């Protein structure tokens, strides 16, 4: 005889399955919208940089004056209409994912409104020639879209999982590197993969890989499909990794001192006079642009690409000027990321090594410099290595990239003990609830 409870249990299970199916369908649709938004954002940023190039070629000095004026105007607009859109956006996503929400300020960190302002203000800064990237902002934009459009969704993942997934999708869409998006979610956003653990993983993999390389050369299981056997990359990786980590750590340390949650005379003055401070940052950016011959404008994508293609010139000049241009742009606290400028700075570091007389292949040194400096800035060695692996698609550099990123992370950690995004997330965490009074 059939138990009377069995039909009821089956109906409950069927409803749960239907609810989960609907939730999955909604998530897929929202993910598609997030990807389309990221692609549209990329086009807006490209058009903004093209507009700046056109204006700079047409009227050099008035266009240079747009830097201080634009920095100040964006700082005012950000504070007036969308304070949650300031900076990279990744710290806001981290804080929103790990903490509770309360009131307007708590909820606006990842919403459609903040995403819209992020797109507009980042585009405005790029049109002014600011040395910023769109990758960090894309993380916040896609996270805001996924969180807003799935609010109230039943039967699916929780708020934290959705925010983390949206942020990871932002990295994937910004760089066209899906594996790096997954790694970034684990390594940076979720912070569930302990730093000591992933450092150990990379160390063991690198040492074993180098030992295998020493014994049998650039061995590929099914034969070499692409790339080249360049043993010099293994010997370049430690040196480039150490230098990239050093300067990456210095960049993070300086930026956190200015815009972080800590207190010092500079950060106190910036908080008291944010628009004037942003104007000063714009003046500094203008001076750097003039001194560098205009190679500091925008994300730095074209400059890094030209170095990968053995373009003469630049190198150390690009590394130094991009380092300071990115620092003052980020210090203004306007919307904008540090990923793409970090890759351009790292490309300059690598190119400087390639032209120093050391027996390092130019392209390998540039790629290693990009990965090492990025790892030094964000202290996410797995993400940095995977991004460059997927971007360059050169299997011969997998081991050297991981070695350079590991060393860069270690050197940077000596200067900056905690990763920059997690320090800056302190600006966006809500204060803890006061304990209930005993009655």
Image (tube, rainbow, N blue to C red):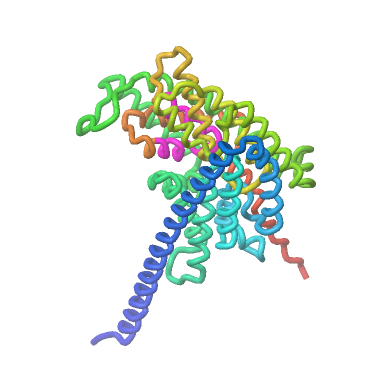
Q: Look at the image and tell me in which quarter the N terminus lies.
A: bottom left
> Is 13 left, or right, of 82 in this rendering?
left
Q: Please say whether residue 406 is visible from this viewpoint.
A: no
Residue closer to the observer: 168 or 37: 37
Residue 191, compared with residue 305, is above or below; it is below
Residue 115, compared with residue 282, is above or below; it is below
Task: Give residue 331's position: percent from left, percent from top.
Answer: 67, 40
Q: Which residues are magenta?
A: 365-388
Task: Give residue 370's position: percent from left, percent from top.
Answer: 47, 31
Residue 286, compared with residue 8, is above or below; it is above
Task: Give residue 24's position: percent from left, percent from top.
Answer: 38, 66
- Going by the picture, which residue comes out furthest to the top? 357
Q: Main secondary structure of the magenta part?
A: helix
Residue closer to the observer: 93 or 149: 149
- Numbered disc total: 0
Q: Please say whether residue 318 is visible from this viewpoint.
A: yes
Q: Which image quadrant is residue 430 in?
A: bottom right
Residue closer to the observer: 148 or 352: 352
- Going by the picture, which residue comes out furthest to the front? 58
The residue depicted at 46 percent of the width and 17 percent of the height is 355
Residue closer to the observer: 27 or 135: 135
Q: Look at the image and tell me in which quarter the C terminus lies.
A: bottom right
The residue depicted at 76 percent of the width and 67 percent of the height is 438
Q: Is residue 368 part of the magenta span, yes or no?
A: yes
The residue depicted at 42 percent of the width and 56 percent of the height is 35
> Is 364 left, or right, of 408 in this rendering?
left
Task: Give residue 375's position: percent from left, percent from top.
Answer: 50, 34
- Going by the picture, which residue comes out furthest to the left? 222
Q: Which image quadrant is residue 2 in?
A: bottom left
Q: Is residue 344 part of the magenta span, yes or no?
A: no
The residue depicted at 42 percent of the width and 60 percent of the height is 31
């Amino acid at each position: 005889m059939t138990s009377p409870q069995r039909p009821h249990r089956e109906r409950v299970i069927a409803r749960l399955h239907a609810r989960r199916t609907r939730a999955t369908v909604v998530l897929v649709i929202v993910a598609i919208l997030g990807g389309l938004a990221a692609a549209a954002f990329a086009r807006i940023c490209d058009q903004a940089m093209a507009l700046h190039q056109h204006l700079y070629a047409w009227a050099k000095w008035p266009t240079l004056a747009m830097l201080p004026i634009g920095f100040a105007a964006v700082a005012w607009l950000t504070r007036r209409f969308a304070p949650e859109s300031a900076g990279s956006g990744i710290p806001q996503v981290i804080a929103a994912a790990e903490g509770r929400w309360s009131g307007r300020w708590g909820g606006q960190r990842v919403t459609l409104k903040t995403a819209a302002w992020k797109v507009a203000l980042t585009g405005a800064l790029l049109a002014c020639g600011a040395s910023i990237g769109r990758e960090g902002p894309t993380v916040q934009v896609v996270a805001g879209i996924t969180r807003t459009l799935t609010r109230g969704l039943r039967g699916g993942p929780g708020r934290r999982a959705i925010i983390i997934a949206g942020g990871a999708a932002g990295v994937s869409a910004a760089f066209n590197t899906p594996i790096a998006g997954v790694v970034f979610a684990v390594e940076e956003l979720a912070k569930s993969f302990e730093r000591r653990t992933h450092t150990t993983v990379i160390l063991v993999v690198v040492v074993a890989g180098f030992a295998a390389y020493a014994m049998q050369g650039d061995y590929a299981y099914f034969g070499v499909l692409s790339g080249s056997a360049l043993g010099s990359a293994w010997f370049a990786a430690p040196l480039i990794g150490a230098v990239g980590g050093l300067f990456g750590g210095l960049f993070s340390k300086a930026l956190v001192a200015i815009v972080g949650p800590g207190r010092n005379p500079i950060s106190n003055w910036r908080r008291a006079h944010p628009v004037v401070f942003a104007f000063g940052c714009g003046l500094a950016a203008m001076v750097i642009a003039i001194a560098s011959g205009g190679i500091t404008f925008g994300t730095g994508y074209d400059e890094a690409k030209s170095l990968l293609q053995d373009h003469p010139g630049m190198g150390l000049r690009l590394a130094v000027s991009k380092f300071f241009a990115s620092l003052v742009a980020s210090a203004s606290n306007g919307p904008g990321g540090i990923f793409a400028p970090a890759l351009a700075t790292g490309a300059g570091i690598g190119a400087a090594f390639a032209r120093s007389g050391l027996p390092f292949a130019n392209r390998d040194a540039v790629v290693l410099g990009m990965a090492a400096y990025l790892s030094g800035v964000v202290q996410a060695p797995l993400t940095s290595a995977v991004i460059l692996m997927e971007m360059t698609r050169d299997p011969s550099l997998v081991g050297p990239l991981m070695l350079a990123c590991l060393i860069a992370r270690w050197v940077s950690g000596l200067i900056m003990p905690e990763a920059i995004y997690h320090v800056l997330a302190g600006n966006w965490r809500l204060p803890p609830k006061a304990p209930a009074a005993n009655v």
